[in-house]
Amino acid sequence: MNDTAPITLPPTLADNPRLDQWVHFPEPGRVAVATGKVEIGQGILTAMLQIAAEELDVAPERIQLESGDTDLTPNEGYTSGSQSIQQGGVALRLACAEVRQLFLDRAAAVLGYPAAELTIEDGVVTRGGNPTGHDYWTLAPGIDLSSRATGGARPKLARQHRVIGQNAARVDLAGKVFGAPSFVHDMQMEGILHARVVRQPRRDATIATIDEAAIRRAGKGEIGLMRDGNFLAIIGDDETIVEAAATVAPGHVTWDGVEPINPYQEEARSLLQRPSIDRVLGAPLDQAPRGGRREATFSRMNIAHASIAPSAAMALYQDGRLQIWTHSQGVYPLREAVARTLKLDPAAVSVRHVQGPGCYGHNGADDAAADAAVIAFHNPGRPVRVRWRREEEFGYEPVSTAMMVTVSAALDADGKPVDWTTEIWSGKHVGRPGRGNSVLAEEALPNPPPPIPPADPPEAGGGGGTRNGEPLYAFPAKRMVHHLVAETPVRVSSLRGLGATTNVFAIEGFMDELADAAGVDPVAYRLSVLADARARAVIEHVAQMSGWAPGARFDNGKGRGIAFAQYKNRAAYCAVVVDVEVDETVRVERVWCAADAGLVINPDGALNQLEGGVVQAISWALKEGVRLDQAGISSLDWESYPVIRFSEIPEITAELVGAAEDNPPLGIGEAAGGPTAAAIGNAVARALGTRIRDMPMTRDRIMSALLQI
Amino acid sequence: MPATSFTVNGNAADVAADPDTPLLDVLRNHLGLVGSKFGCGLEQCGTCMVLIDGSPRKSCGVPLSTVAGRSVITIEGLGTPKNPHPLQQAFLDEQAGQCGYCLSGILISAKALLDRNPAPTRREIALALDDNICRCGSHVRILRAVERAAAMMREGAEA
């Protein structure tokens, strides 16, 4: 590597090249740092502080960190796709390194020493360990931080790190443990107008009748009804009264243009019968040898984000300016969507991120913010808080599409694939407003925009349905056949992992089937077709952690499974081993997880993300599936949409591999999901002696699998 | 409207509100105590958990009238940053949380457990927290934190 060549700017630094968009020095002793990435429970604020403190050589306590604010922070798009560190952190790191170098160069000019003889200790320029009388704040007036980033300053090497790589306590956790206001739900403002929306049951549905008297009776107090087109809201000063009215309101409003949906569409197999946009990626189809192929089909139902609380937002329209406080993952795209909805100049709209319940993707946050904006626009001068109802979040958030995945392979004499196909049927995986999709309020207001054609992120961006559809294994020919199903029975969008969860479940399940057919241990079989050294290392590491023994025998009803993936084939490498016990249900008893995420900023934070990903994937694999009836989603509470509970949690051990090496940071937030689901599938197959290829692996599916033996 | 009198975190409270008002709304909107959270309003998720005369209750389903004359403890009554309850200290020590929305309810359920059982097993802790949902998957850290707090409290009692 040429150490003097400028570094290619990461995308969000190239998009926001002014250095003062990232760093400035507002007052003596203070450093203002800005990131476009937002805290969604993944610990990003803490990691960004570590990055800035490291590269600027200042104590973290001096840093005032702004995040996700259209008035104050760079536009870094969405906080999604495990890119907060891999892109946002790398951008901030380079910007801070360059700012530090500008100050060193300036100090060198002022002092008459070579810059190489100077360093910075907690903001003070020193030479030979002695203060020079200059610091960031004395030098700042002579430096133009509105200059553009050039990539000319190289960040520190891992061996120079004092803050990066150390476990740091989450900066936001204490407030949450002591009950301080931490979420947009908790914001206090004078004269709040509470609001609930009576949701349009479908796009294009129109209000037929409203029994206003019945709604008012249920409220037992003063409420107002606000209607614009088919957007109907209940507003009032007393949240209890508004909530009581809103709870019964859907039963007192009738709609035209609501066609019943076919509840059978809750099953993934229904995707096969629907029109789709079809593509072949990778090796041409006609190279596939005829005959002698093995194949298997795997699936997953639609699943919900199921955030612990329903979405909420605050908005205030005053003096021609609209302010929004939201837990959206993308304040800038939301600003565009709201400005479009209300026909406002985006410059007249400010959107600020305030934390919310963990989202794991595109839940109701953006829609709730648009609701609040519309209601505030109609009630100028009053701060409006919208908080969705529980059944509203389950019923109207975009869910993650069901998927069907058929994997097939032609094998050589040793039982190794020479030609591999992953065929995927899936709805789209991104329906975010930033990609041209409408927010719910926009669809209910007069003159709604037409729906846009379905689209997934391009493969260069990690893909959607195709994410991790191509195995990392070194097979001579690999291809994906992608059927992007054009219409889904309910709204769908991004959930942690996108298509990777089901694709890895399928690929890694099939790998175990091929290993068994070849009579080879699953770990050895994977290693025999895997060239990537880092991939091999995480598999070997997790095998060692778990005491993996080829041919080990387990008691009746027990089993052990392994699975591996590199998220998006370019983010963190992750391998998982699980032990299960199966009778009428599956119990995961023990989990080991190893991941290589390149350079890790906050190791404890990364482990927390791996552990959380493991737990969520156990829940997906064993329990979760969105239910439908003719009206739409019918799993509207925690009984009809069960998720994993404390008494079902196994012991989990996660370890990082290569965390302090000078490899680029790799996103880790979504790395564990696919491997965990697949390892459970493989362990269950060993425990039962037959495989369940459909998620969730429920009691009914265990019973029918046993009947087929 | 008649006032209902009770104590919250040891302080007298008189709230003039409809007696059917959920205690959670009273805490958050009438008393400004936003540590207890709305999660479902259906008594299914545990984010609104408080202690009423020492017993864990989901405050979204508790009408104001039923707490007249009783003692309510919320997360704000557990401890402060300067004087944290051992559970709060242990949750910070273990970094037990991600989004943190569920934590106040979990801390309350855990306090109820440790008040009646100072030396619970891992299994007993898990069962005591089964009424609380954590969606981020911080469960293992939370279970460890409750074990750690129990040990801290036992050591404190012996000292």
Image (cartoon, rainbow, N blue to C red):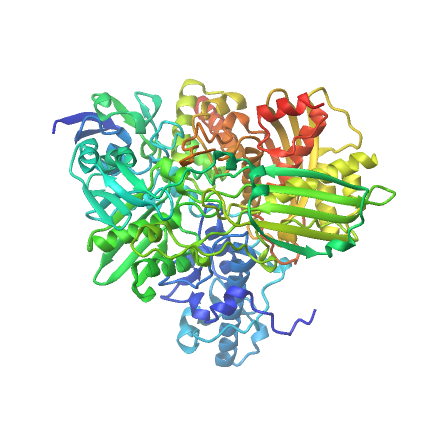
Residue depicted at 34% across the width and 36% down the height: B37
Image quarter hosting the C terminus of chain A: top right
Residue depicted at 51% across the width and 37% down the height: A265
Residue A327 appears in the rendering: no
Residue B97 pos. (x, y %): 47, 39
Image quarter hosting the N terminus of chain A: bottom right
Nearer the observer, A326 or B33: A326
Residue A122 pos. (x, y %): 48, 62
Left or right, A413 with respect to A454, comes to right
Q: Quadrant of residue B157?
A: top left
Is residue A532 positioned above or below A627 on the image?
below
Residue depicted at 32% across the width and 48% down the height: A313
Residue B108 pos. (x, y %): 38, 28
Residue B88 pos. (x, y %): 42, 34
Nearer the observer, A244 or B117: A244
Q: Quadrant of residue B112?
A: top left
Which residue appears farthest toward the right when viewing the image? Answer: A413
Q: Quadrant of residue A408?
A: top right
Left or right, A377 with respect to A486, comes to left
Nearer the observer, A598 or A77: A77
